[in-house]
């Protein structure tokens, strides 16, 4: 009985610690800094301002400028909670408009660079399997995302100066 109680208390304490970690105070940081140094912010709660694009098929991403960059590494996938759909519809006029928003959530980063091939130039009769890493969002294309979103709000154009 004592062992069961000890385990119960341990699990309870761990759940409190995890719960408190999820509500950590956000780091207010320019989106361009998060994009330039993603590993520095991996796993941290961030608050950033950027242009939310939900207008194209299979997109829900954040970027620094209105113009869509050619390089997907300049985009951050947004994993929207279902509870935010009504607000997103309002802000983006039913997904027909790019919107400047402030978003707070947990930032995640995965290095999607291809693994280095071993033995290039050597003749090998053994087939090799090369694992290609996948990321976030549609078809795992994004290397960055914001998830566990705690707030989304329309941002004023004056906030754009922070970029």
Image (cartoon, rainbow, N blue to C red):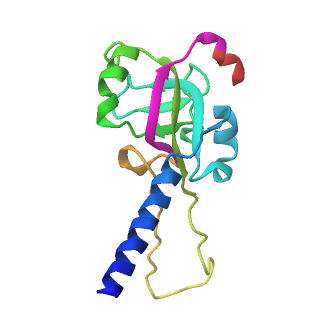
Compared with 1, 120 (above or below) is above
Which residue, as the protein is rendered here, is positioned at the far front? 2
In the image, residue 134 above or below residue 158: below
146 drawn magenta: yes
In the image, is 10 to the left or to the right of 89? Answer: right
- Find residue 27 and report its horizontal and vertical position in percent: 64, 39
- Side of 160 where 86 appears, left or right: left
Examine the rendering and report whether any part of residue 158 can be seen: yes
The residue shown at (58%, 34%) is: 47
What secondary structure do most residues of the magenta stretch adopt?
Answer: strand
**Span highlighted in magenta in the image:** 144-158
Front in this rendered view, residue 36 or 19:
19
Quarter in which the C terminus is drawn: top right
Quarter of the image containing the N terminus? bottom left
Image position, residue 161 (x, y; %): 71, 17
Quadrant position of residue 34: top right
- Residue 92 visible in the shown view: no
Measured as percent of width and height from the top left, residue 150 is found at: 45, 36
- Residue located 31% across and 27% down the image: 85
- State the residue at coordinates (67%, 35%): 29
Image position of 111 with respect to 57: above or below: below
Side of 134 relative to 68 (left or right): left
| Nearest the eye: 140 or 45 | 45
């Amino acid at each position: 009985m004592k062992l069961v109680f000890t385990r119960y208390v341990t699990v309870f304490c761990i759940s409190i610690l995890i719960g408190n970690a999820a509500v950590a105070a956000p780091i207010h940081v320019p989106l361009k800094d998060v994009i330039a140094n993603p590993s520095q912010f991996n796993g941290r709660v961030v608050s950033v301002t950027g242009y939310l694009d939900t207008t194209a098929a299979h997109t829900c991403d954040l970027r620094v400028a209105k113009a869509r960059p050619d390089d997907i590494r300049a985009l951050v996938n947004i994993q929207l909670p279902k509870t935010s759909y009504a607000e997103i519809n309002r802000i983006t006029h039913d997904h027909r408009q790019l919107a400047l928003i402030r978003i707070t959530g947990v930032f995640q980063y995965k290095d999607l660079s291809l693994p280095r091939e071993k033995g290039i130039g050597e003749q090998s009769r053994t087939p090799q399997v090369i694992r290609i890493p996948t990321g976030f969002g549609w078809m795992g294309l994004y290397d960055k995302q914001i998830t566990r979103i705690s707030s989304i709000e329309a941002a004023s154009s004056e906030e754009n100066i922070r970029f």
